[in-house]
Amino acid sequence: MVNYEDVVSAAHQISSVVHHTPVFQSQTLNAMLGIDVFFKGEHLQRTGSFKFRGAYNALSRLSMEQRKSGVIAFSSGNHAQGVALAAQLLKIPAVICMPTDAPAVKVTATLGYGAEVIRYDRMTQNRETFAAEIANKRGLTLIPPYDHPHIIAGQGTLALELIAAVPNLDALFVPVGGGGLISGCAIAAHGVDPHIRVYGIEPEQADDTARSFRSGVRTAIAAPDTIADGLRVNAPGVLTFPLVQEHVRDIITVSEADIRAGTRYIYERLKQVIEPSAGTGPGALLAGKVPAGVRRLGVVLCGGNVEPQTLGSLWDDVS
């Protein structure tokens, strides 16, 4: 299991290569909600998302033999880019398995970082099995997107930064896909202050973690279809789900309309381009889903890798 000391260690491990991303506020939003909201801008992280944190932490701890042989990862885009850049910096060969419907901007960036990209159909092929077969054939080390102790610890470093910049937070809103980000952030938050409430924000159309959280058992759903492509996971992680159960107060789900509205709001009011996965937290705010008693709230903007067509389509339903 991952603990607070692992997150602190990860912070030291990656401190020289990551961006210490800024915190934003919207006074208009604060006035509307009657609370103080602090947005952690991980869309301005290297590769455009928080994923670089965990990827570099994991790859930098590999043995020399593992580095020489190379690594493989599977991802719709952000973990792909994080692993690709970390591998480039550490001079490790990297193979990335990406779904055929992955956003073109993410595929192009992954290739640009020097990784080999192999495509698969996420509707008919299991990505874990697909990547494992290639790993076995080539002798590569698999770096999963969330079910890995060093990945979880690395992602939690952003919460350490946020809490250091903004003390006395009551709660955190963290997007939920496989659970690596929220697990790491919750461990970090509770290592600093056990009273901070951590809430996962998840698309209604990809609510595997919400269902699992309610039932107490990891529950799989059909391949989800949501504009938040970074959160298209059909079951929470084996390692991450127990951490979610231990540290997370609740999972809040948001509609596709909420996600679109949240993404638009950040663009229009803060002049920041985020991807729809990052729009889940702002979407929950605009939908009136702030839990009672929360006065100072940290919201993670997890990434900014969005295709221009998707960004433009966010205004299609606005009259």
Image (cartoon, rainbow, N blue to C red):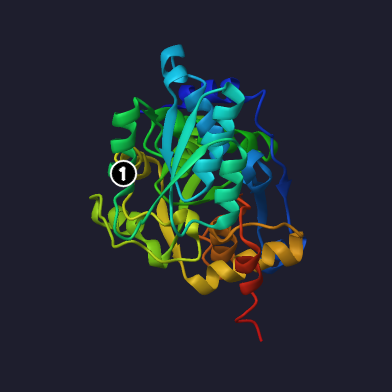
Q: Is residue 91 visible?
A: yes
Q: Quadrant of the C terminus?
A: bottom right
Q: Nearer the viewer, residue 230 or 180?
A: 230
Residue 161 locus on image (x, y percent): 64, 34
Q: Is residue 16 left or right of residue 204?
A: right
- Give the residue drawn at x 39%, y 37%: 144
Can residue 286 be spotted in the picture? Answer: no
Amino acid type, label 1: Phe
Residue drawn at x 53%, y 36% is 115
Q: Quadrant of the N terminus?
A: top left
SS label for mark 1? helix
Image point 64% across, 57% down: which residue?
Answer: 274
Above-or-below relation of 12 to 153: above
Mark 1 packing: few (<14 Cα in 10 Å), some, or many (20+)? some
Give the answer, above or below, for where 69 lies relative to 160.
Answer: above
Q: Quadrant of residue 26?
A: bottom right
Q: Residue at x 62, y 37 (%)?
A: 163
Q: Position of residue 236 (x, y in %)?
A: 33, 48
Residue 263 higher or lower than 106, as above or below: below
x and y, in percent, of residue 185 in the image = 50, 39
Corner quadrant of residue 294: bottom right
In the image: residue 236, left or right of residue 34? left
x then y, percent, for residue 198 = 48, 47
Residue 233 lies left or right of residue 201; in this view the side is left
Number of marks in the rendered image? 1
Viewer-proximal residue, 35 or 70?
A: 70
Reading the image, the residue beneath label 1 is: 130
